[in-house]
Image (cartoon, rainbow, N blue to C red):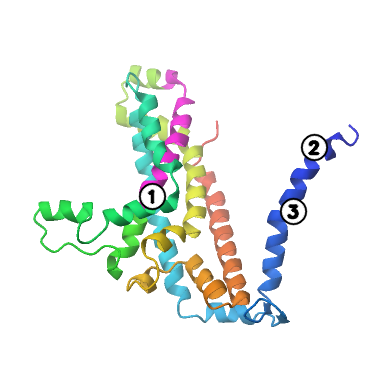
């Protein structure tokens, strides 16, 4: 085979090493050091940064907010299964149009869409509160400034934003299921619900599992939506702070790069642990045929 495989694969592997593995190694080293405000004069401090992270009073709430957001956004997967199943019903017209309509929000810039939702959530003239006032609710909440509602409002936006991508993946999975299985089930007298439960969901489980992994990883990276919709100086900000928000505050606001790097490693380990658990659990419910 000669050197041709190395010639073609080499640049790709070099890119991965430079832009992926080297930053991980550099981050691990930084998490064991303390620098000045300009990131210079690194001093080895061992596990002191990790000790500071785990003793931080904000870590528990940030971890809870991140997990809660992720769990709420994961609810978009069963909703997407229902939507995709309806779109792929035999005989339904304008299927391509429906797919495009659901996928278009996913193509928009997330920060721009978040700003639109910020207007929708506005306590005075936002669409949600206008609807609630029309239904007789005289004092609807100010969604993005009330600590008890702000995180749920951002999570609802995240759920909505994920549906377009989910529907496209699930629609592709549904199209790969042989129609003969549904025809045979109909001959045997199986209802639509029984066909959905016994054929659609099991054969769609690999796609559902893939979306669960991607949604979990995305949920643990929560930052952009919070920054755009909640911002700083908001009374709800301390109650909606995520793990990545905590990293941003320590690394770029407080200029504590060592502690910021330690938080990044903690996030990485949490995502890896949850992903491993999901991969171990998928053997019980994911069907590969």
Magenta part of the protein: which range? 157-181
The residues tagged by marks 1 and 3 sit, at their Cα atoms, a distance apart of: 34 Å
The residue depicted at 68 percent of the width and 76 percent of the height is: 32
Q: Nearer the viewer, residue 69 or 225?
A: 225
Q: Position of residue 190 (x, y in %)?
A: 32, 24
Q: Check if mark 2's residue and mark 1's residue have beta carbons within 8 Å.
A: no
Residue at the spot of label 3: 17
- Mark 2 or 1, nearer chain start: 2
Q: Quadrant of the N terminus?
A: top right
Left or right of residue 6: residue 130: left
Left or right of residue 207: residue 139: left
Q: Please identify the residue farthest to the right as the structure is shown.
A: 2
Residue 153 versus residue 32 in the image, above or below: above
Mark 2 element type = helix
Q: Check if mark 2's residue and mark 3's residue have beta carbons within 8 Å.
A: no
- Mark 1 or 3, nearer chain start: 3
Residue at the spot of label 1: 113
Residue 251 versus residue 135 in the image, above or below: below
The residues tagged by marks 2 and 3 sit, at their Cα atoms, a distance apart of: 15 Å
Q: Position of residue 203 (x, y in %)?
A: 47, 32
Q: Residues within 10 Å of mark 3 (few under 14, many from 20)?
A: few
Mark 3 element type = helix
The image quadrant that residue 3 belongs to is: top right
Q: Position of residue 62 (x, y in %)?
A: 44, 70
């Amino acid at each position: 085979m000669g050197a041709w495989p190395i010639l073609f694969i080499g640049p790709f592997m070099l890119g991965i090493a430079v832009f992926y593995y080297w930053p991980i190694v550099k981050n691990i080293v930084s998490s064991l050091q303390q620098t000045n405000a300009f990131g210079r004069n690194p001093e080895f401090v061992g596990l002191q940064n990790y000790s500071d992270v785990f003793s931080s009073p904000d870590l528990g709430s940030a971890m809870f907010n991140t997990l809660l957001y992720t769990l709420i956004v994961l609810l978009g997967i069963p909703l997407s299964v229902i939507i995709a199943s309806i779109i792929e019903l035999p005989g339904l017209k304008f299927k391509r149009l429906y797919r495009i309509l659901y996928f278009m929000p996913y193509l928009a810039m997330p920060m721009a869409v978040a700003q639109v939702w910020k207007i929708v959530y506005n306590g005075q003239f936002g669409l949600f509160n206008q609807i609630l006032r029309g239904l007789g609710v005289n004092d609807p909440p100010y969604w993005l400034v009330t600590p008890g509602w702000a995180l749920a409002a951002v999570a609802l936006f995240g759920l909505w934003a994920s549906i377009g991508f989910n529907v496209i993946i699930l629609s592709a999975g549904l199209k790969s299921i042989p129609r003969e299985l549904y025809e045979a089930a109909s001959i045997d007298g199986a209802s639509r619900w029984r066909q959905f439960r016994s054929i659609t969901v099991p054969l769609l489980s690999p796609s559902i599992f893939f979306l669960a992994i991607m949604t979990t990883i995305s949920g643990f990276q929560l930052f952009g939506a919070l920054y755009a919709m909640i911002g700083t100086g908001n009374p709800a900000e301390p109650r909606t702070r995520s793990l990545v928000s905590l990293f941003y505050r320590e690394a770029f606001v407080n200029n504590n790069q060592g502690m910021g790097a330690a938080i990044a490693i903690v996030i990485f380990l949490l995502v890896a642990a949850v992903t491993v658990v999901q991969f171990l659990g998928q053997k019980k419910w994911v069907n590969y045929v």
